[in-house]
Image (cartoon, helix red, strand yellow):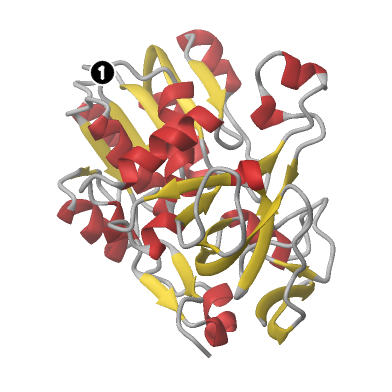
Amino acid sequence: MRAIRYLAPGKVRLEDVPKPEVHNGQVLLRISHAGICGSDMTIYSGKHPRAKAPLILGHEFSGIISSPHPDYPEGTLVTIYPHQACGHCATCLRGLSHTCSHLRIIGIDQDGGMADWAVVPEEAIYPLPKTVSGALAAFVEPVSIGVHAVRHGKYQSGDNAVIFGAGGIGLSVAITLRRFGADNIMICEPNEARRKIAAELGFALGSVENPLESVLDFSKGEGADFVFDCAGHQSVADVLPDSVRIGGSIIMVAGYKIPPTFQFQKGMMREFDIRFVRNSERKDFSIACDLIQQELGYEKLLNCVLRPEEVQKGFDVPADALKVLFDFSREV
């Protein structure tokens, strides 16, 4: 079968590998689509602390059940909750299994879904109706991150929100916020292609030249109630403390490749909260499965669907791509 494998820092390749065997407690999937995540790029760069080559990448994927499952028939379209918790560490016992002390992730700690076939634990399966495309099904996991960011950030209907970054996650946060009742959202993003998609989705845009000034105008000089950092860039970290109102909340969704400097003194003076997002809980994932079935605009974010043979193009990340997906549904 075809599989996209990480082989060494800066080296991924489509290879022919054996079809995986199915063991007790597992199910075989015929893969439909698999997406590239920021963590895949970290693996690709050789900087992920756990991922070891050779590794079939991919933790954002969808497929068709192709072996017996205790709850769902063969032929069912499914998406995968990739996080596997131990269930017995102190963190799991506190009900925080998504941050399990021994967390293992499909596509990071074991082979993932960028292949024609994959085996996953039976409990990782989330079914979706056939009205949902395989591409959208593969996007549930990123949507669940947006859901978790909004719920974990404790957004309340009626408050305003500013989002820095209009990539796949940033726009997922924006769409989710709107579905959860936010009607006053601004997005700050310098990339023109991304700004265009955000505008087409009906979101207000901040200035490219002076985003902080736009945020203050948007919030009547007070700063936003909620600020979501989905960019992960020093230029954003520089303006976050002045973008949020006194007593407001900053939600850190993006992972910073380079540790940023941050004006903590302003945090002390303004007493805002900072919350961090690692991944999603199963409740978030279930909500994302429901949201993806509604016509909310998530499909507009899937603007770069490639053949597996275009693996290098995908990992070079086309400049205007919001989400890169590999389509494994076509026969070789």
Q: Residue 313: x, y in percent?
A: 53, 82
Location of residue 136 with respect to 286 vertically, above or below: below
The residue that appears at 26% across and 28% down in the rendered structure is 216
Q: Residue 225: x, y in percent?
A: 33, 19
Q: Residue 113: x, y in percent?
A: 62, 64
Q: Which residue is mark 1?
A: 159
The residue that appears at 67% across and 77% down in the rendered structure is 3
| Circle 1: element type | loop
Examine the rendering and report whether any part of residue 174 can be seen: no
Toward which corner of the image does residue 120 lie, by quadrant?
bottom right
Horizontally, residue 102 falls left or right of residue 309, namely right
The residue that appears at 46% across and 62% down in the rendered structure is 75
Residues 193 and 245: in front is 193
Toward which corner of the image does residue 59 lie, by quadrant?
bottom right
The residue that appears at 20% across and 48% down in the rendered structure is 295
**Which amino acid type is shown beneath numbered disc 1?**
Asp
Horizontally, residue 2 falls left or right of residue 129, namely right
